[in-house]
Image (tube, helix red, strand yellow):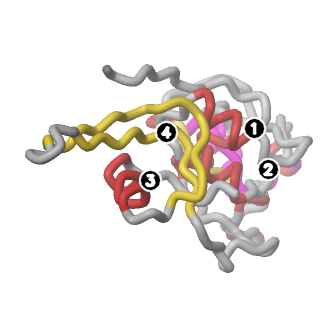
């Protein structure tokens, strides 16, 4: 199960400590150490795109609720205003509460959508029905694997394949294509 994004330094620590159970994907880093004066051999660690460690994480249960932030919300909705349907830069977007907080709505994944500032101001403290605005998609709470994807800045193709295999079958995120190809340096 995907747990979190780690940097290459943490991955090297896992390799060195013998905590890597298996690895997948293409190599993304090759680190070279010093040369052994007795054998002439040079130490080298190759870090793959996906590193699985030994152990379990008991905190991930079916009741897991990922933390809500504007960055991950905007990525969940593809930086599209779910009222007018236009794509915007993050600086032009805002978090809209479908059922406003003033009407008892919650600040939760299932009650928030990405809205451009214009649409959010027009809707104001009303529900979409009260404002005469159609909601283009139903807000959803991402699973842990979906949340890991939403947190990622540059997702490599093999990492995306791995994450996608853990998405629910009907996930709206399943067909996203914003991945990065990266070659290993010699």
- Pair 2/1: label in front: 1
**Residue 113 among magenta residues:** yes
**Which residue is at 71% across, 28% downward?**
176
Query: Which element carries disc 2, helix, strand or loop?
Result: loop
Q: Which residues are magenta?
A: 111-129
Q: CA distance from mark 3 to mark 2?
A: 28 Å
Relative image position of residue 170 (x, y in whole percent): 91, 41
* Outermost residue toward the left in this view: 37
| Upstream in sequence: badge 4 or badge 2 | 4
Q: CA distance from mark 4 to mark 1?
A: 24 Å
Cβ atoms at labels 4 and 1 below 8 Å apart: no
Tell me, yes or no, if residue 64 can be seen here.
yes
Q: Which residue is mark 1?
A: 173
**Camera-side residue: 151 or 43?**
43
Cβ atoms at labels 1 and 3 below 8 Å apart: no
Relative image position of residue 69 (x, y in whole percent): 54, 57
């Amino acid at each position: 199960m995907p747990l979190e994004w780690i940097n290459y330094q943490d991955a090297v620590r896992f390799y060195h400590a013998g905590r890597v159970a298996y690895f997948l994907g293409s190599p993304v880093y090759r680190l070279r150490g010093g040369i052994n004066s007795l054998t002439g051999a040079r130490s080298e660690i190759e870090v793959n795109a996906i590193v699985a460690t030994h152990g379990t994480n008991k905190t991930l249960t079916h009741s897991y609720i990922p933390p809500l932030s504007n960055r991950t919300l905007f990525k969940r909705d593809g930086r599209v205003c779910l009222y007018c349907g236009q794509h915007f830069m993050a600086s032009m977007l805002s978090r809209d509460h479908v059922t406003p907080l003033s009407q008892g709505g919650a600040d939760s994944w299932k009650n928030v959508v990405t809205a451009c500032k214009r649409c959010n101001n027009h809707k104001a403290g009303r529900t979409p029905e009260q404002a005469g605005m159609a909601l283009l998609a139903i807000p959803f709470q991402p699973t842990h694997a979906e949340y890991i994807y939403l947190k990622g800045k540059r997702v490599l193709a093999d990492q995306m394949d791995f994450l996608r295999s853990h998405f629910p079958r009907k996930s709206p995120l399943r067909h996203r294509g914003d991945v990065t190809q990266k070659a290993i340096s010699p």
